Image (tube, coloured by chain):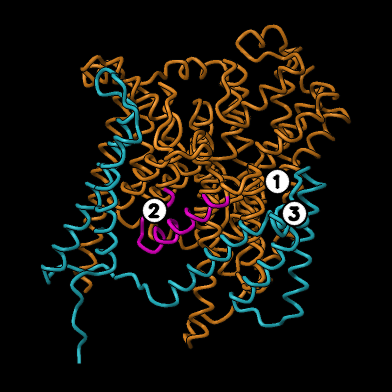
Chain colours: A orange, B cyan
Amino acid sequence: MDALVAGILSVFTLGPLFGIAAGVAVGIFMGAIPGLTAAMAIALLSPITFGMEPITAIAFLVGIYKGGTFGGSISAILLNTPGSPEATATAFDGYPLAKSGQVKRALQMALFASVAGALLADLLLYAVAAPFSKIALKFGPTEVTFTVLFAFTFVAGLTGKSMLRGMAACAFGVLCAMIGLDPMSATPRMNFGYIELQDGLPLLPIAIGMLGVTEVILAVERSIERRQGNNANAIQSISETSGPPLPVAEFLTYWKTVLRSSLIGSVIGALPGIGASMAAFVGYGTARKYSKTPEKFGHGMLDGVAAPEAANSAVVGGSFVPLLTLGIPGNVTTALLIGTFLVHGIEPGPHVFKTNPTLIYGIFTILFVANFFNLGLGLLGSRLYSHIVKVPEYASYSVIGLTCLSGVYASSNSLFSIYVMIIFAVIGYFMKKFDYSFVAFLIGFVLAPEFEISFRSFLLVAQGNPIGLLFKSPIALFFCALTLLAIVRITWTEHGKTKKARRQS
Amino acid sequence: MIAPRPIMTNRQVVSVVIVMLCGVALWIIPAEVDDGQTSFASGAALLPDLAVSLILFFVLLDLVISFARRISMTKVLEADVVIKRAQILGLLTVVGAMTVYAIALLLLGYLVASGLLLIFLMFCTGGRNIALIVVISVMAVAVLYLGMRYGFGIHLPALPNFTELKG
């Protein structure tokens, strides 16, 4: 109890509070720029924290992590270009809301859901950090294989118009992730002689190409159609108005979605290697599943903004469970944080709860307090950001195009990344036109490395009897059953839709 | 007069192209992957082969279903995708401009190449007020460059590389 009080009090001093505020501001700004992520900001700014007090340095970096998670949603909503990969799902409904003149509502829903989801997750972190670490320890190759397989099926089936095309897109994502080095033998694989492909295809150029550049191509296409006399695409800005704000009372009516997504994000965050992107997609898919109007998702539903934002923000709190209790970073950002912790003489792991409990409770408090800074700075910023929508289409999309190119080039200082972005912009354009879900593609691409190691280890451990090994793991068996159930349910729903369309025609 | 129905829709053409590309991929993968001697088929080629096979299976199934719907007049046909001059021109314009930008970036420097790209893109997306286009281009490039340079410490090649220009 003394450690708890001392931990809380250690944060409420000038240094840590200023660190949180500065970190959140930098995080929001970096997160909002496509191509630049919170992880990159932490990597760039870690050196300046080396001279700080440990608690102030952690406050600054945690602030960046928190701010960056929300910041990604700003460009996702305003430009249909997620500032960070975990904001991809936010763009599905956030951008249509912005286009229909509800910019402020979409931005504020993202902010409120993000803060509420993170607050719930941080409270959970206080309560369940130690017990949950025991469950996470039980995840071996078999369990991870079937958990990821379930994620593939769930996302591929729910994010497109056709499950078959969604599955094909997901498999294509997995195929693209296979380029680089074989993770088990470290031999080059499918790099076609390009040294730049040794590390695999980079995620950010792919995501930015498929989402941001595709929008620029569509804007040019609309302009050409206008010149050809098709008035259906009359010149327009993203939206004529930023629209009314979102009253808090209205936000509270979405409590079920926020609570559900926050729980999803907390659990996924605590599982190493899965991360905020998957939490956002699963949160989105679940919100759609439980919605009374699932067909409206993708066309501007506030639920579709609240769910991924609450889920991806909850991952921050969740990801500190394996980080602090086991010393295992669950994602790139926490991996970078571990590096900074070590510089400050903090070695995360089970023993740190005994050796330095004040610091642990201080970190919990920083996570909690950062949410309020996120809320304050986000509210101030949302008024500023919403003016972007009044910019004419030709100016906004052209600047998006240049921002995509600059961000991608700056993130790697390599022209190769720009070429990758252009190639995937073309692929993304055709995927969008022909209903091959790029969300399924991205989830396949992101989770494939983790899936491959687990799947191949599972086959090796099974010694030719994978079914036998599956039946030995209740967790894997549970996710296997869920996968089959998802396939049957989604196929049945699609069949029902076809029958309905036939009756109507 | 009703226009004759094409043999294949654009969706079906794309599905056929994907099937053909899968065939090429299955042919290329063995040459690009050192599968080694791993037990229980868990070698380096396992997932690439599996992914291509799954794409092939799902796309073929989709193709068969769409042909079946086309033959059976009682079933609802999925609306086809329009690919005309505007779509092809839009794609080629942006892809072409960005490729030229990537090549020009090191030769002309970030400031000049980005300014020219912005002017071109704004013209292509419907901007006609030349003065406004130039002002927006200069401001956007300056903000991005200074933000990268002093905000994040990222040094973009600002000016033309005369050594490269000389060859």
Q: Residue pushed farthest front?
A: B167
Q: What residue is shown with label 3?
A: B161
Which residue is at a point 43% across and 38% down the rendered structure image?
A191
Looking at the picture, how far across and down is residue B69, in whole percent?
16, 65
Spot occupied by residue A229 in the image (x, y as percentages of width and height): 48, 88
Q: Which residues are magenta?
A: A418-439
Based on the picture, tell me whether residue A127 belongs to the magenta stretch.
no
Mark 1 in CB contact with mark 2 (< 8 angstroms): no
The reply, left or right, for residue B120 in relation to residue A300 is right
For the residues carrying marks 3 and 1, which lies nearer the camera in this image? 3
| Left or right of B127, for residue A258 | left
Q: Vertical placement of A494 versus A241: above or below?
A: above
Q: Which residue is mark 1?
A: A30
Kind of residue at badge 3: Asn
Question: In x, y percent, where is residue A485?
Answer: 26, 38
Give the residue displayed 82% in from the left and 30% down from the top.
Answer: A48
Closer-to-camera residue (A367/B132):
B132
Q: Chain of mark 3?
A: B
